[in-house]
Image: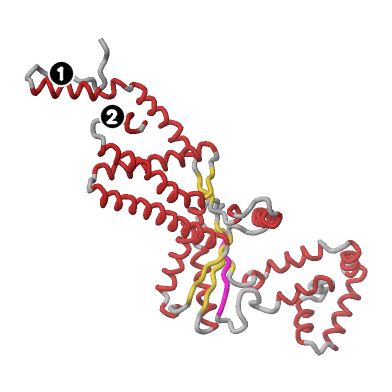
Amino acid sequence: MELCDTAELELCATLMKEHQLGPVHLPHPSLKHPGRWLWLFLVIPVALGLARLRFDVEVFDLLPSDLPAVEGLKLYQQYFANARELLITLKGKTGEQTEEAARVLAEELRRETNWIAGVTWEPPWLEHPEQAAELMAYLWFNQPPSVFGELTNRLAPSRLTETLANTREELATSLSPQEIARLSYDPFGLTRLPENIAGAAPAFGEGQQGFSSSDGTFRIVFVQARGELRSYTDCERWLEAVKATNSRVLTNKPALRGVALGYTGRPAFVAEVASGMQHDITLSVGGTAAIIAGLFWLAHRRVKPMLWLLTLLAAVLGSTLALGGLIFGTINVVSMGFAAILLGLAVDYAVVHYQEALAHPNLMVPQIRHA
């Protein structure tokens, strides 16, 4: 006896019902395809791939890796640039208001020791003069032996009296207020650095250079994160915490209202670029899915097939990402932008398949797929 396929059995059942020949039990479709349950084993690699998946949002990784300039920028960013440092800019109406705002923000941020390592809002030697001595000693210690030998000879016990006498004579004859002030506190000339590094010495006495504009209405505050900001989500969360703290401080101080804040540095740059990419990609993929659903509804006026179509597209996209995460681990976030194009291509097959099923209701799914 030759076996009939499901379509023939359904036709026989209909004829027997019409002629009251008794019920006919059709085989369940799942019994004919026992191999379909093997797809469940793919859940394990998909889960592993999603757990391993990471999105790369570094700007340098978006550039061609074979260019020497790009490779040099990566090395500089990795070994020389401070990737945890955030620069906060303050713009106020007056120099006094801007300086007060910088000081208050620095004091408030320093209290957040769990996620902030340090805050610098003015030259360290003004806030901590004792650090100037350490820097001066470091500069002297790194001089050539001949230059360092001149300092040790000048400070030798046998020449201390002569050194002090020369300082006393210079104080009596000098007309420079700066020299008089310096020698009054430094009779041994430790702050008189060699000429090759003397350009760094005036910074100790020129106030806020590097931290403030000439009129004082614009200032910069340097904030360093406590931990490593490895991913764009870490940068975004840390930056939002800093912004929330600054907003609370300025709101609670009426005298500081009107001070405009700006943020730059790697944490701000990565957070802004990554959030922009995430928004654009989400809008692109979501917009494509919405257009697909709208066109399907206009063509067929059916909700259930439309939901199945979107569910299968989401499952295919998620499985592809999981496979990429399982193989590569890290995927460039720009690659997600192609998901919208691929969704538009994949949906064509589904729409054609559904249209053929409507045109040939007597055919089975394998037959429609084969056609």
Residues at marks 1 and 2 touching, judged by CB atoms closer than 8 Å: no
- Image height check: is 196 above or below 216? above
Say which residue appears at 41% left-offset and 27% top-offset: 41
- Whether residue 113 is visible, yes or no, is no
* Residue at which label 2 appears: 364
- Image height check: is 344 above or below 123? above
- SS at mark 2 in the image: loop
Q: In this rendered view, identify the residue nearer to me: 317 or 123.
A: 317
Say which residue appears at 84% left-offset and 73% top-offset: 195
* Residue at which label 1 appears: 24
Say which residue appears at 22% left-offset and 48% top-offset: 301
Q: Amino acid at mark 1?
A: Val
Q: Identify the magenta region.
A: 218-224
Indicate the position of residue 342 as horizontal and vertical percent values: 44, 47
Indicate the position of residue 293 as horizontal and vertical percent values: 30, 50
172 magenta-colored? no
Position of the C terminus by quadrant: top left
Position of 247 compared to 332: left or right? left
Q: Amino acid at mark 2?
A: Met
Say which residue appears at 29% left-offset and 49% top-offset: 296
Position of 21 compared to 49: left or right? left
